[in-house]
Image (cartoon, rainbow, N blue to C red):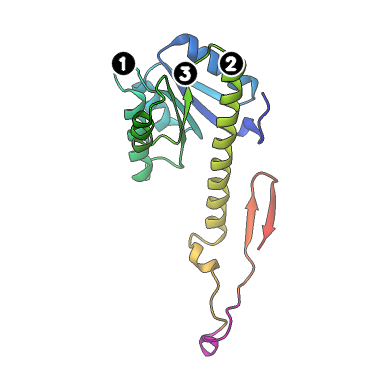
Amino acid sequence: MHFRDNASQYNVLIVDDDPVILNLLTHLLEMGHYRVRSASDGNQALQMVLQDCPDILIADWFMPGLDGLELCRRVRQLHARKVLPHYSYILVLTIHSSRNSIIEALEAGADDFIQKDVTCLSDFRAEIQARLNAAQRIRRLEIDLEQFIRLSGGNPSQTQCRPANSKTRNRPRICRPVRLFDAASQSCLLF
């Protein structure tokens, strides 16, 4: 599997009550050099999220006890309450593909879907790869934004354009340069 970013920096939690799917996904992601943890039910996964918030969460929709959609809702609530240190990109494994099912999962907090159809392993692998590449792009943007906020002293509005002084309010605004750490290239960018 070829991933666009350094996959080893991403912590992925896979949750599925089907040991065959769980082992398959774990194997595929480990081949892609992800740091992978797994859980066999939603309650166990929620505890793991609280212990070490994953960058990417892959959860089966239908599981006994706490199902994938309820897990999505709880993870989003924890993030909204600032209990979790960062946003987790959530992919829902599902056999459903109806529009209503997609809407229901998105409203529960899912970011994307993976069809739980492994009849053609190469297609399944390609879909996993594409969806994880999208998840990496979103996480990379969040990491860059967090770095930008840290560099701005916790107040990103301080980096916006402001008048040079009170006497020049009607003149064009002068912006000071902003340095942004680009985690992907491990370098600073100047804007």
Which portion, as a residue range, is magenta? 165-174
* 51 lies left or right of 131: left
Q: How many marks?
A: 3
User: Does dot 1 land on a helix, a strand or a loop?
Assistant: loop
**Residue under label 2:** 27
Out of 60 and 26, give the one closest to the viewer: 60
Please tell me which residue is depicted at 68% across the width and 27% down the height of the picture. Answer: 2
Q: Amino acid at mark 2?
A: His
Q: Is residue 97 above or below residue 80?
A: above
Q: Amino acid at mark 3?
A: Lys
Nearer the camera: disc 3 or disc 2: 3
Marked residue nearer the N-terminal end (3 or 2) = 2
Q: Is residue 171 above or below residue 63?
A: below
Residue 116 location (% of width, % of height): 47, 18
**Residue under label 3:** 116
What residue occupies the far bottom of the structure in this picture? Answer: 167
* 90 lies left or right of 136: left
Please tell me which residue is depicted at 57% across the width and 78% down the height of the picture. Answer: 173
Please tell me which residue is depicted at 50% across the width and 32% down the height of the picture. Answer: 56
Q: CA–CA distance between discs 2 and 1?
A: 23 Å
Within-10-Å neighbours for mark 2: few <14, some 14–19, many 20+: some
User: Which quadrant would the N terminus be assigned to in this image?
Assistant: top right
